[in-house]
Amino acid sequence: MANKIFLVTKLGTTNIGNQALSNEIINLFISQVGENNIIVGGRPLGLLLYDFKKMQKSDKPVELLESWADRIIRKYENEKGSKIFRPKLNFVKLVTNSSPELKYEGIKKFLRPLKKRIKKYFLYEKSYKKRLDQINSSDVLIYSGAGEVGDTIVFLRQLLEIRIAQKLGIKTGAVNQSVVVKSEVFKKLLSHVYGKMERVVVRGKVSKELLAECGLIPEKISLAPDTAILTTAIKLNRENKVGINFTPNIKFNADKIRVVIEHLRNYGNEIYFVTNEPIGDIQIGKELIQNYDIQIFPQIESYLEYASKLSQFKYIISTRLHTNILALASEVPIIALEGNQFKTSELLDQLDYPVPVINAYKDGWMDVLNEEIDKLESGKYNHNDYFSIILPAAKQKVKLNAEWLKEI
């Protein structure tokens, strides 16, 4: 009999890549347990008993987390929650500039500190009681955190929920994620909560090493590629276009990037600004368009549409992780720039991609980029074999994010 699972993933996002990896992980687990054995929940909103600053300063973070979890469970048990499993599928909504969610964001941002001060006296909202019923009726809670596993309030809240589930007797696991925990406080919390999981599946070797450093036994840690690589979109005819994007995190200079733009144009390429995070990258996009008269995509409504649009390109140069992943899913060569610590490097290593990732935090990276452009234009890399043999084999490994369920 299939396990009944409660799958946690981000269900509202401005990032096309987040939509891709979350929808594909949902589909992957549906293939494992069936639609009648899964509840898909978003982030744990309505869980109020946590204080990020207090945790950061604590010399006993594990004890503090345990006390929070115990108080919430005592209240929940007094309310006599339900254990009836009711399957519920949710998929990810992409938030764009025209979405109503952003219309009042300025007002919401202003009111959040006030609401937080009021709510700190409550353990959880009524809506979270329903979520606890869903968790308590499941056999396994699975957390698909992707890139949010770090020293943040979002991850602290999620760790608290996972610990609550464990104390309620629910098995737990974490999948499809990179781990970027730095502080000793969060390393202790990670060790405490993740150490009690059935399995942790990460997207690369750096994350695995960090978990081992936190004391997790190797048998509990698996490696598997990011689920977004499973994206299947309608492919369009290939044109003499090159897509580019750069993010504010790297050593980006709109004037100095001229050497790259001119180099691309010397090969007769038409250049487009592309990004899976249009709201976050809007300023750099404007600079490139104004300074170099390059073109830009119209508004994209889904990750499937984005992947399909990328399939038109000769190749993609991207600092955005999931623009790289979705380009590869559409069989488009990439030159990847490391724009987020180590995530791009460890994900592309899992996909056995032959073109080296360029460290865009270092001086001189644009010269290295031009050298790689020359190599792509001259056919140095055998992308035909990569897309026909190597990538399909790597995609099979994505299933490891879910196949461990058969063992429990």
Image: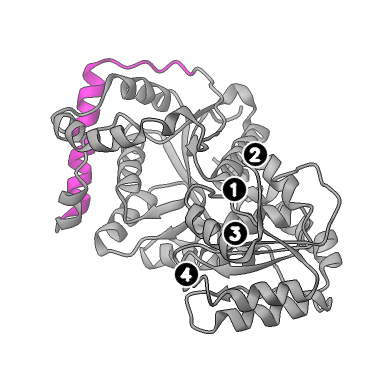
Q: CA distance from mark 2 to mark 1?
A: 8 Å
The magenta-colored residue range is 60-85
Q: Are marks 2 and 1 in contact (CB under 8 Å)?
A: yes
Q: CA distance from mark 3 to mark 4?
A: 19 Å
- Is residue 8 visible to us here? no
Q: CA distance from mark 2 to mark 4?
A: 33 Å
Residue 28 got which mark? 2
- Secondary structure state at the residue bearing disc 4: loop
Q: Nearer the viewer, mark 1 or mark 4?
A: 4
- Is residue 407 visible to us here? yes
Within 10 Å of the Cα at label 4, are there few (<14), some (14-19), or many (20+) other Cα atoms?
A: some
Looking at the image, residue 169 lies above or below residue 386: above
Rendered residue at 56%/59% (across/down): 320
Q: Which residue is mark 1?
A: 401
Residue 390 got which mark? none
Could you tell me the amino acid type at mark 1?
Answer: Asn
Viewer-nearest residue: 345 or 310: 310
- Secondary structure state at the residue bearing disc 3: helix
Q: Which residue is mark 3?
A: 289
